[in-house]
Each structure stands twice: as structure tokens, then as C-alpha cells.
Image (cartoon, rainbow, N blue to C red):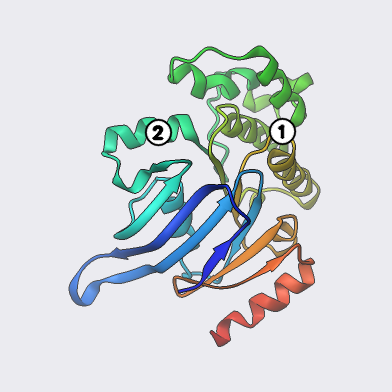
Amino acid sequence: MTEVRVQSGTALRLDSVTKTYGSGAAAVTALRGVDLHLTRGSFTAVMGPSGSGKSTFLHCAAGLDRPTSGSVWLGGTDISRLKPKALTRFRRDHVGFVFQAYNLLPALTALQNVTLPLLLAGESVDPAWLDFVVDAVGLTDLRGRRPAEMSGGQQQRVAIARAVVTRPDAVFADEPTGALDSRTGRQVLDLLRRTATDLDQTVVMVTHDPVAAAHADRVVFLADGVFVGHLDRPTPQQVADHMTHLGEW
């Protein structure tokens, strides 16, 4: 069991998290005692080969799935102990998730898509904060456009703004550049970087791309359901080299 820490003042914490699917001889263990401590304002990339547990880790950390054992803390709340309705409300208010497929509502404008989580929560929109978020992701001139009128990169900007507008404890991104061309992908990665630095959000990104991972403060590596190492501010080549040796694990 390998523990990965990023300074103090934890915004996201996983303690001895395991996740097993099925039972008996058919049981498959996707996570094996994972520990992870991340501070607010950090940007962490998670990498590993297919089947290493990346998606399971992301879903458990974001409260989309429950660990079999261990605990997941977001801010001061152990979300792994919340009942389903309470967990749904907590995710709405404290978790931002950036999907690879954007998941925007086609009938709504960019601004309406961004503010949707606040409206669903019955919260008023802080105009100053909304302007700051919209400007930070470069949507100032796109507020009135609907998804069909925007490029893939522009839609992903909307998805990022929607994920951070509620001031969540953590923002999770699932292969956010997987469906984008290289130029647009770089723009999205720069936005995630600004999300951490300018908006003081904790960003956790799962990716298979060494170039994308190199935008993060730290890259952690999963193999067979456990963290097996990390690199701080690496180059894409260092990430790629590290990935080639994961098979030895």
C-alpha cells in the first residue's frame, strides 16, 4: 500500500480504499488499499495501464461509487458513509465532474449550462463569481451560444465552468482531452491548470496521455489497483518512460 501526499490542508483524502466487484471465485478487486491526500489548489493526474483501476478510483473519489472498505473524505465529510440521498445532495454541492462527452443540455445556452447546478440546488448566482469563472475559462463572448453552435473545445470549457461554479471541494476530470484535437486539448489542459491556480480548486484528472499528464503538479501511477509511484512536474517523456516500466510491477 503506497501513500501519496501533497502538503497539508487536505481537500480530498482516501484512506485504505478497496473496491471489489462480485463475490466468491468471480470476485474482482479493482482497488487494493489506496491512500491519497490532496490539498486545495493542486492539480493531480492519474495514469495506469488498462484495467489498473483508474476509472474505479475516480468514481470512488468523486462519490459516484462506494468503496468496499476504507473511507473517502471531501473537505470534512466522509462521503463513503453517507446515505444515497445525502450523497446525491453532497455531490451536487461539493463535487465537480468534467465528463469526456461534455454532457451539456442542447436547449440551454452556455451560461445556462454553467449555472444549472446552482439552479438545481436552489442557490442564487453570485454575479461576481460567475463573471470570474466565465472569464477564467474564456467564455465571455460565448455566453448566449448553445452547444450545437460551439466547437468541442468550447463545449469542454462550458463543462469545466459548470464543474467549478459551485466552489466544490474537488473537480474530477475523466479523460477530458480524449475526444479533442491536440490544439484544443492543450487549451483545455491550460484551463484545468487555471482552475487549480486561479480558482483555487483541487483538480484530479484521469488520462492515458503523457502530454496531458505533464500539465499536472504531480502524476501518480496505478497498477493492479495500487499506487506504485509518482512524479512531480515531469516532462511528457518522463511520464512515458515511467509508464513503460509499470509492466514490471
Front disc: 1 or 2: 2
Per the image, label 1 sits on a secondary structure element best described as helix
112 to the left or right of 224: right
In which quarter of the view is residue 187 placed? top right
The residue labelled by disc 1 is 154
Check disc 2 and give the amino acid type: Phe
Residues at marks 1 and 2 touching, judged by CB atoms closer than 8 Å: no
For label 2, the SS is helix
Q: Is residue 184 left or right of residue 71?
A: right
Residue 172 locus on image (x, y percent):
55, 46
Image spot of residue 141 (x, y percent): 79, 20
User: Mark 1 or 2 closer to N-term?
Assistant: 2
Query: Which residue has dot 2 on it?
Result: 90
Instruction: Determine if residue 144 is in view.
Output: no
Residue 170 vs residue 176, the one in the foreground? 170
In the rendered image, the quadrant that contains the N terminus is bottom left
